[in-house]
Amino acid sequence: MKNVVFILTLLFMAVGCNENNKKDAAEKEMTTVDAASETSKEMAYQSFGEKINDQNVLTAAEMKEKFEAMEVGDTVEVKFRSKVNSVCQKKGCWMRLDIGDKDEAFVKFKDYGFFMPKDIATDEVIVAGKAYVEKTSVEDLKHFAKDAGKTEKEIAAITDPELTYAFVSHGVLLPETAEKQ
């Protein structure tokens, strides 16, 4: 009889411990699911152009290093994350991205196939496409200044071509939290 009571006691203890372990595992799994939900909410993007993802993305500083190592005519396929400094105020057909030390990357969109919202300055985006360095003519610089809403005096002050860190993007991700209505 003592053995039966002893065995039953051990059995109840084992079942009780197992239930606690299942409860702990379930709570841990719920926490993991909640964390994953939070992550997916934080990583939701509005997509423009071709579908791209947020994997293997360079920082703005890493992109600047790539640009600085390039010469006119060089190109490189790359994806990078940066803050938007400005967007074309006529159509959203270009944007300037901050790459550090007051330098910018001038971004156009492949085949003018898509445009960006005009009110995303200061938001962060991920762009994928082809980076290159080009010499931008005075005529083009004046055109871009006009599109950006610069004054006639500022536009008239443009008298020399500039070396431009340029980018043709085939896809852009804009975080949903940054989306403007």
Image (cartoon, helix red, strand yellow):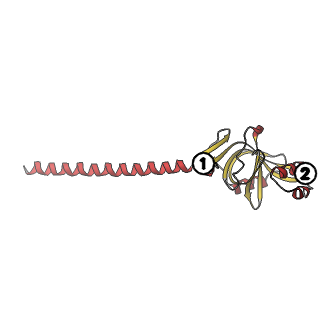
User: Mark 2: which secondary structure?
Assistant: helix
* Farthest-out residue, bottom: 101
Of pointers 2 and 1, the one earlier in the residue sequence: 2
User: Please, what is the three-letter code of the amino acid marked with disc 2?
Assistant: Val
Toward the viewer: 122 or 163? 122
Residue 170 visible in the shown view: yes
Toward the viewer: 165 or 13? 165
In the picture of the structure, the residue carrying the numbered disc 2 is 138
**Measured from the top left, where is residue 127 in percent x and y?**
69, 47
Res. 154 mark? none
> Residue at the spot x=47%, y=51% of the render?
35
In the picture of the structure, the residue carrying the numbered disc 1 is 176
Q: Is residue 164 left or right of residue 170?
A: right
**Measured from the top left, where is residue 102 in percent x and y?**
77, 61
Dots 2 and 1: beta carbons under 8 Å?
A: no
**Measured from the top left, where is residue 48 in percent x and y?**
67, 41
> Residue at the spot x=82%, y=52% of the render?
164
Q: Nearer the viewer, mark 2 or mark 1?
A: 1
User: Mark 1: which secondary structure?
Assistant: helix
Residue 56 visible in the shown view: no
> Residue at the spot x=32%, y=50% of the render?
23
**Measured from the top left, where is residue 98 in percent x and y?**
73, 56
